[in-house]
Image: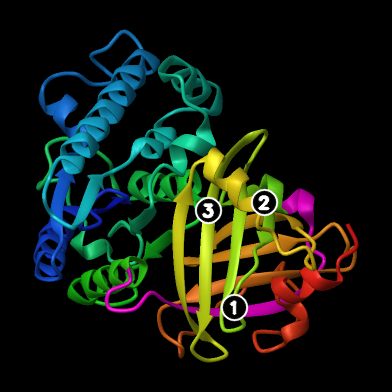
Amino acid sequence: MDITKIVITGGPCAGKTTAMSWIQDAFTQRGYAVLFVPETATEFIKGGVAPWTCKTNLDYQKCQMELQLKKEELFMRAAKGMKAEKILIVCDRGAFDNKAYMNDEEFDEVLEHVGVNPIELRDSYDAVFHLETAAKGAEEFYTTENNAARTEGLKKAAELDDKLISAWTGHPHFRVIGNDSDFENKLRKLISEMAGFLGEPEPYEIERKFLIEYPDIECLEKDPACSKVEIIQTYLKSDDNEEVRVRQRGLDGNYIYFKTVKRSISSEKRIEIEKRLTQKEYLKLLMDADTYMHPIRKDRYCLTYEGQYFEIDVYPFWKDKAIVEIELRDEKQEILFPGFLKKIKEVTDDENYKNFSLAKRVIS
């Protein structure tokens, strides 16, 4: 049985309701049992429980988080008892959406209340797809009439959209679906991104990589659209035609673990299969580490910019340069670089700048 849990999120009037119908049709045809976890905030507000009816917003957020996590737990339990081979659990907003409606201190208190750490909670979802609000680039289609729980005007909706993107930035599989085309093509792009993530029909990864000047770390850490992640990547013994690695990923002592197998198709395209690991599984696989390779340690700064998702890798052995990567669904997709990232050259095809090559040369 293969169970995948994803989040569909976005600013107000982004098209989530219609998107759910498209997802149902597209992935049922691909052989998935598709389960939908309803949006908790809408359920609460329509039922009379809201930030303005509770004693405080914090009281409301604690209730909402508890119900959100309980629903997801029950959907997962139900999925494990089903006979389908492929199950897709689609959360209409995830637990980290709540962060956009609180300050950092309140969010920390809510997490403490439900007993989870932020890395574990955010990355408990396999992928997150953010639909951009119509208030950013499609203003003529923005309305509050089709959702009784929606009260935001254009300016507030755009601000909330930015906060939601900031909340999820740092997730290993986060994609922003913008309003750079008509609504139907926006939903086609969503389905394409989801299909690519799920490996339908092949889990292709199109990746471009650039060498940049050493970035302004203080600037990155202050940017609300940027999130830092600590990574330790260890290569395992493998056949010549593939690359196998395990990765510890997280921050401040809170980590999750992955195993990744990559097989090259071309210089820019390769099959990538990733599996989530328990800490016990991760530690066991470390015993099969390739002793000719050094573990790679790096700080990754995940940055959302103009609907794109950049991953800036800063290595402890470089003081003058760093690497930025971006994954694409289309080989011809134009890349819009932030002005504060000073590009030196593209190194997509340069073996010297692949982590696999760096692991051979790095002195631990």
Q: Earlier in the sequence, mark 3 or mark 2?
A: 3
- Which is more foreground, mark 3 or mark 1? 1
Q: Which residue is pictured at 78% across the width and 68% down the height?
A: 359
Quarter occupied by residue 115: top left
* Amino acid type, callout 3: Phe
Label 3 with label 1: CB-CB less than 8 Å:
no
Which residue is tagged 1?
Answer: 239
- Which is more foreground, mark 3 or mark 2? 2
Name the secondary structure under disc 1.
loop
Q: Earlier in the sequence, mark 2 or mark 1?
A: 1
Which residue is tagged 2?
Answer: 287
Question: How far apart are labels 3 and 1 at the CA level?
Answer: 19 Å
Q: Which residue is pictured at 17% across the width and 35% down the height?
A: 149
Residue 229 % position (x, y): 64, 48
Residue 90 % position (x, y): 23, 50
Q: Is residue 212 magenta?
A: yes
Which residue is tagged 3?
Answer: 258
The span picked out in magenta is 199-219
